[in-house]
Image (cartoon, helix red, strand yellow):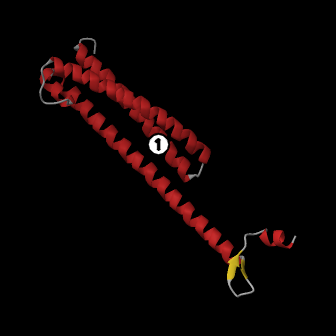
């Protein structure tokens, strides 16, 4: 690494930061999934806050990577757009390393998307399940607490209401 061109060294550092950031985010999302499954609301909230912080850090690292890549490619009058793969033409001796970085970053993005989708799906499932459970609970409660009025119409009373009416 010591005899690497400074541009390759700089990109290498940015790729490593992105990889570390995405690994931390994936770890947090896996812990979020466990917390959702175990219905640990305190941990869900704590991990959501941590995820937000890590997302900000990841976005900053991503922006630094883009700026570094942009600086390298603009200095070479590259017109193919901002692509990591364009570095292969500038640094053909590092083609394998550049391809490795591209694969690593693509895999990280795919894993981040997969974990994010899992978290969202689990949260939606939990919300829908809780809504159905509450609906059943209140409809059963209402059914059991039906009272007939003098006109024959029904109305339900919540537990404790009859006591309040009689007192």
Query: Residue 139 in the image: x percent, y percent?
Result: 63, 73
Q: Secondary structure at mark 1?
A: helix
Q: Residue pushed farthest front?
A: 151
At horizontal 73% and vertical 73% (from top left) the residue drawn is 157
Query: Residue 69 in the image: x percent, y percent?
Result: 24, 24
Q: Residue pushed farthest top?
A: 3
Q: Is residue 116 left or right of residue 104?
A: right
Q: Residue pushed farthest right?
A: 167
Residue 94 found in image quarter? top left
Where 84 sits versus 144, above or below? above
* Front-most of residues 23 and 164: 164
At horizontal 52% and vertical 57% (from top left) the residue drawn is 126
* Front-most of residues 125 and 101: 125
At horizontal 38% and vertical 41% (from top left) the residue drawn is 112
Specify the quadrant that holds the N terminus: top left
Question: What is the tally of numbered marks visible in this picture?
Answer: 1
Specify the quadrant that holds the C terminus: bottom right
Residue 97 found in image quarter? top left
Q: Is residue 85 left or right of residue 23?
A: left
Instruction: Name the residue beneath numbered marker 1.
Output: 29
At horizontal 28% and vertical 26% (from top left) the residue drawn is 66
Residue 102 found in image quarter? top left
Query: Residue 70 in the image: x percent, y percent?
Result: 22, 23
Query: Residue 154 in the image: x percent, y percent?
Result: 68, 82
* Front-most of residues 147 and 58: 147
Q: Residues within 10 Å of mark 1 (few under 14, many from 20)?
A: many
């Amino acid at each position: 690494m010591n005899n690497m061109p400074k541009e390759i060294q700089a990109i290498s550092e940015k790729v490593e930061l992105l990889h570390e950031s995405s690994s931390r985010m994936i770890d947090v999302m896996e812990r979020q999934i466990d917390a959702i499954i175990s219905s640990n609301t305190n941990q869900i909230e704590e991990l959501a806050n941590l995820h937000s912080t890590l997302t900000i850090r990841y976005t900053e690292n991503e922006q630094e990577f883009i700026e570094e890549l942009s600086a390298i490619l603009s200095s070479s009058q590259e017109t193919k757009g901002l692509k990591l793969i364009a570095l292969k033409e500038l640094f053909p001796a590092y083609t394998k390393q550049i391809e490795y970085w591209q694969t690593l970053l693509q895999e990280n993005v795919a894993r981040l998307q997969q974990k994010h989708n899992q978290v969202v799906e689990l949260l939606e499932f939990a919300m829908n399940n809780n809504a159905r459970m509450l609906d059943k609970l209140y409809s059963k409660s209402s059914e059991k607490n039906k009272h007939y009025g003098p006109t024959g119409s029904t109305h339900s009373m919540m537990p404790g209401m009859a006591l309040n009416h009689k007192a």
